[in-house]
Image: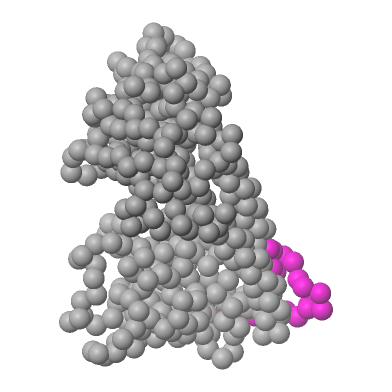
């Protein structure tokens, strides 16, 4: 089976046609797969709503990247004004024409019956069972499918890139027989459920850690064997600001701060004007430092540098922990929203977006600190929770890679499924 798959991949890569395949304008496909125009497979469904001013209506929205439908808060008919709205029909392919290029697509179900959508959310029903909607959604999440959505959404950026429905329906897609479409969709849907269950478990673990932090780091709960009094101290007594800059020629990775931690800048942005400027001095941060963005505390941008030695913009602040404190304990303490909201009392600025907490003011803040032994014990408990979370995160990452591989193999016909 593995050798057969590799052989097919290698032959297709070379432009050769394996047994059971054929060459088409769409590439090399299984012999019983065909290229169809979307307009042959889908027909538009719309049932206008006769809006009544005093009735309540629930509108739907569609998340980008194939994440499906969500519901908005109910509103009165009067608040809809003269907006054109339509009843949601079940078992339809639905798309947000404003963000189709960003894969804002979904499938309607019985759960949405009685809800409404604006003219921006056209619905399509399969013609003569020629296409399975779940298969179609998976197809549009591949590069080939995304290219179709982007080509049918001309324009400069964002809201100017509106899906042209006529052009969309003239697009051509590759379809296996309906039975194979359904089997492929079932396999991919099953993988989605695996990912969803693990993401729920991850969310529960993160919630448990947050509760544990709130209990331990505020002294509401003490670990066994500890009962000593906590002492009040200013942060300047346990942290000092690192003000070293990168000399020219010294190679360090260029990173950025976010609510999720420290990342290489090229992983967060893909813009030419954010490339490292060789004539600019960058601040150095070392592994274990506690870093924050003075102007972004409202978004919770405080994090421990678990990335390693790096450089970042001089607008960021980086602290090194002194010897008289457990660094891991302190990092957990400072990343709590209770602390972040409290230290924001030092914010200064004339415009909300530019409100910032200067490092000298940050270091004025007073906290209650247990003895170093209790700090270390708490840090070990929280680190164990972090390890569980990281293992789950890596597991989810692998499951997503598995789905990506399945899509690549199944939606191209390299691997066939038995019906």
The segment highlighted magenta reads: 211-233
Whether residue 230 appears in magenta in the rendering, the answer is yes
Q: Which residue shows up at 71% across the image and 84% down it? A: 373
Tell me residue 160's x, y (percent). 21, 38
Left or right: 109, with 121 as reference point: right
Residue farthest right in this picture: 225
In the image, 305 versus 231, the foreground residue is 305
In the image, 302 versus 201, the foreground residue is 201
Q: Which residue shows up at 17% across the image and 82% down it? A: 279
Vertical relation: 223 (above or below) 251: above
Q: Which residue shows up at 25% across the image and 35% down it? A: 152
Tell me residue 132's x, y (percent). 48, 28
Tell me residue 179's x, y (percent). 53, 30
Quadrant in the picture for residue 351? bottom left
In the image, 180 versus 82, the foreground residue is 180
In the image, 322 versus 234, the foreground residue is 322
Vertical relation: 159 (above or below) 109: below
Screen quadrant of the C terminus: top right
Dominant secondary structure (helix, strand or loop) of the stretch shown in magenta: loop
Vertical relation: 94 (above or below) 43: below
Screen quadrant of the N terminus: bottom right
């Amino acid at each position: 089976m593995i050798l057969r798959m590799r052989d097919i991949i290698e032959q297709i890569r070379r432009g050769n046609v394996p047994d059971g395949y054929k060459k088409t304008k769409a590439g090399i496909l299984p012999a019983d797969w065909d290229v169809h125009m979307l307009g042959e497979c889908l027909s538009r469904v719309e049932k206008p709503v006769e809006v009544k001013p005093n009735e309540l209506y629930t509108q739907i929205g569609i998340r980008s990247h194939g994440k499906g439908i969500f519901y908005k808060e109910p509103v009165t008919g009067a608040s809809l004004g003269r907006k054109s709205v339509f009843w949601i029909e079940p078992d339809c392919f639905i798309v947000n024409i404003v963000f189709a290029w960003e894969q804002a697509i979904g499938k309607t179900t019985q759960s949405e019956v009685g809800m409404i959508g604006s003219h921006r959310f056209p619905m399509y029903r399969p013609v003569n069972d020629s296409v399975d909607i779940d298969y179609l959604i998976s197809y549009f999440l591949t590069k080939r499918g995304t290219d179709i959505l982007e080509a049918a959404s001309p324009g400069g950026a964002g809201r100017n890139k509106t899906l042209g429905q006529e052009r969309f329906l003239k697009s051509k897609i590759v379809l296996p027989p309906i039975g194979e479409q359904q089997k492929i969709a079932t396999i991919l849907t099953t993988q989605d459920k695996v990912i969803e269950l693990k993401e729920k478990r991850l969310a529960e673990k993160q919630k448990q850690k947050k509760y544990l932090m709130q209990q331990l780091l505020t002294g509401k709960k003490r670990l066994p064997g500890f009962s000593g009094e906590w002492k009040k101290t200013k942060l300047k007594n346990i942290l000092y600001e690192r003000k070293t800059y990168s000399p020219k020629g010294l190679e360090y990775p260029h990173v950025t701060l976010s609510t999720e931690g420290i990342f290489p800048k090229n992983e967060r942005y893909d813009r030419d004007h954010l490339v490292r400027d060789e004539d600019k001095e960058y601040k150095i941060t070392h592994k274990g430092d506690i870093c924050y963005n003075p102007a972004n505390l409202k978004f919770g941008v405080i994090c421990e540098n678990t990335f390693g030695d790096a450089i970042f913009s001089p607008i960021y602040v980086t602290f090194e922990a002194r010897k008289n404190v457990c660094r891991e304990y302190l990092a957990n303490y400072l990343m709590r929203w209770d602390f972040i909201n409290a230290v924001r009392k030092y914010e200064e600025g004339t415009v909300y977006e530019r409100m910032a907490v200067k490092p000298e003011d940050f270091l004025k803040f007073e906290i209650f600190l247990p003895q170093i032994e209790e700090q270390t014990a708490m840090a070990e408990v929280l680190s164990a929770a972090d390890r569980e979370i990281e293992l789950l995160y890596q597991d989810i990452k692998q499951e997503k890679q598995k789905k990506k591989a399945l899509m690549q193999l199944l939606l191209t016909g390299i691997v066939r499924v038995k019906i």
